[in-house]
Image (cartoon, rainbow, N blue to C red):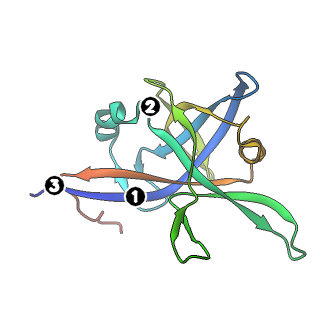
Amino acid sequence: MEKKYTSIQSFARIKPIEKVNDEFALCKVYVQSVGKNRNYSYMSKENIEKALPTLNYAPVVGHLIPKYDDNGNVVGHYMGSHDYEITPEMELKAVTVPYGVVIEDSFEFETVNEFGKDEEYLTCRCYLWEGRYPELADAIYDENTCFNQSMEVSVDEFRPLEED
């Protein structure tokens, strides 16, 4: 079978661990669950473990988008990913920002209770540049902020799960 490349979209959780200095925060990222994910992708622990070296020093990029209430007040954020805007000159401008980096070999598997069910999650640690991006600090300390996440994967073999 010819190798194919695809991007898988999902949500990630980011949990602050400690403030390293005035510029950086050490955070834990809940990357994906083992097996079936909420986006209906399925990855075995064996395949996740094979791919771990590709996450070393991966950039953490995003675009914080404000959430508004009915009165136009900012009430939180959600994280976009590879977003663009159209300038008045009708040009595409990337609005994605490099917020941080994944720390080498910082991966662990952790059991998380999600929607009343225990799930095994791949986690990693990263440094986030909250000193330069104060809106990022607001978002990572807000448990209601959802972070979009994408993985670019090379696929040797795929098939739908029978249950789907």
Q: Which mark is residue 3?
A: 3
User: For mark 2, does the 10 Å Cα neighbourhood hold few (<14), some (14 to 19), or many (20 or more) residues?
Assistant: some
Which residue is the extreme one toward the right?
A: 71
Residue 20 locus on image (x, y percent): 70, 22
Q: Which residue is mark 1?
A: 8
Which residue is nearer to you in this view: 161 or 90?
Answer: 90
Q: Quadrant of the N terminus?
A: bottom left
Which residue is nearer to you in this view: 66 or 88?
Answer: 88
Q: Which residue is mark 2?
A: 57
Q: Which residue is found at the position 58% from the left and 40% from the top?
A: 112
- Which secondary structure lies at badge 1? strand
Q: Which residue is found at the position 76% from the left and 26% from the top?
A: 22
Quadrant hosting residue 136:
top right
How far apart are labels 3 and 1 at the CA level? 16 Å
**Amino acid under disc 1:** Ile
**Amino acid under disc 3:** Lys
**Amino acid under disc 2:** Tyr
Q: Which residue is found at the position 84% from the left and 71% from the top?
A: 69
- Which secondary structure lies at badge 2? loop
Which residue is nearer to you in this view: 36 or 58?
Answer: 58
